[in-house]
Image: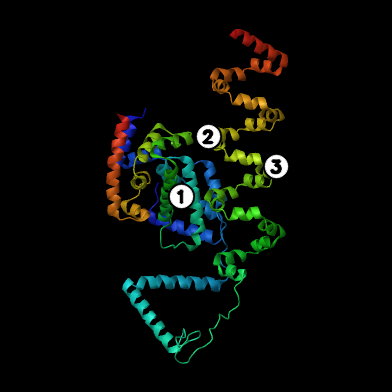
Amino acid sequence: MVNREKIELILREIEDANTPEESAAFRSLMEVEPPPHLRRAILAALPKPSPASPNPIVRWTRSQLKSLTALTEAFMTRKTMIYAGATLAIVIVIAAVVIDFPPLSGTAGTMGDPPGVQQAARYHGRTMTTADVSLDNPQIKALLQNDRILRLVKSDVFREVMNNAAFRELQSSAAYRELMTSDAYRVLLSNEAFRELQQNDAYHELMSSEAARDLQQSAAYHELMSNDAYRELQTNEAFRELQSSAAYREIMTSEAYREIMSSEAYRELQANDTFRELQASDLFRGISRDAQLSELFMSEVMQLHQ
Amino acid sequence: MEQQPGAADEQDRALIKRYLDGESDAAGDLVDRYQKRLFNVALRMLDNAQDAEDVTQTVFFNAFLKLRTYDPRYKFFSWVYRMTVNESLNLLKRRKQTVTLEDETAIPAVEAMIDDATELQRHVGKALMKLNPNDRAVVVLRHFMFFSYDQIADVLEIPVQTVKSRLFTARERLRGTLRERVS
């Protein structure tokens, strides 16, 4: 039950009726400490600071330009800017007429009055290549100016991936692009465990398997992944130990286990506290370790039902 | 003890300059100055600690990414608070696309994520979530961050009059919800 006094404190805070001391009390009541891992996560994901320009002339020019912009902003009113813009436009039009640019008198490809028929002129420039397009793009240009990236994209392995039809198909998918540019993926990229996982052969083998794909597409899998208890279990040391044991793997892949897991009664039993208590008891575990004892126990239980 | 806004701005500017000059420790100092406050704003806006963590992390990432183009004439604190509120509002919009209003109670709330969450915090969190997100932002900045009307107007980029009217509406509703829960 919520403490009435505290609620009154909140209500007074909302009315702006609290004394500074009461406000401080309210604040300490409501403030939540961020989890300790948050600071580490923030710092780990931060972009690396690009070093300050070593060239003092460049720095000076930059600062001067900045002050000039500030000065212009400070002195130029909206009206002045409109007048200045209009004046500039007039000057450009006059200049265009005086120097005849673009050539208004050009008649190539036209018919009729002077100077008569003239052969249509083709565009004489050279044909545009992919390289022109890429380097005209400032983002691509900036990216390729980085030596390490340039070396990477020129490498054989990169070429091989780029020539891979599946990769190209993936790249053209909107979902893939969305994923690659998502904040969550960026955070994941800076995660050491994720990097380690990506270099793991077994992980690659699993991810490329048909079964893994089927699993990832199933609604039950998604539901499980978003289940808090399951996520908590995954970080549990004992559970991880269990998962890596051969016996656990054998059971998990057995037909019998699949069958029992689909049984409604078994699910109900598993949710039963007493059943869990029984499973955790030393006595029961001792019985379970021995095949004969285990069978005996089962038959005893069955007899109880008769 | 709260710092005077002017002194805090100066310290922010000094830390930003140190970071831009290549002192990576300054990043840690900036994170320490704002981490708790931004996390609390996001937490009150979203009532979900995991989402609040994500928002805080995204805000810091974006802020540091844009630090080189940051204009020191503007207050750093207004900038990061604005980003936090906007990022939270965006997340709420995205969440609304997948969660219907009836399902809203199914969103993991503060109590599920924070070990030492008090009954009171849950109570206030639920009451805040009943407010319209824009009104909630004003209440959070005013009553949980103790901002002045001018500071709220600056952060949310709205006129002071709008701050006051949103606050008036939000207080009415909040008062009603809180009283209802007590009785």
Which image quadrant is residue B110 in? top left
**Circle nearer the viewer, 1 or 2:** 2
Q: CA distance from mark 1 to mark 3?
A: 41 Å
**Circle nearer the viewer, 3 or 2:** 3
Q: Which residue is mark 1?
A: B34
Q: Confirm whether residue B39 shows in the render.
A: yes
Where does the C terminus of chain B fall, quadrant-wise?
top left
Q: Check the residue under mark 1 and report the chain it is in.
A: B
Which mark is on residue A116?
Answer: none
Q: Which residue is mark 2?
A: A228
Q: Amino acid at mark 1?
A: Tyr
Circle 1/circle 2 CB separation < 8 Å: no
Circle 1/circle 3 CB separation < 8 Å: no
Does residue A226 appear left or right of residue A281 in this picture?
left
**Circle nearer the viewer, 1 or 3:** 3
Position above or below: A287 against B3? above
Which mark is on residue A202?
Answer: 3
Which image quadrant is residue A26 in? top left
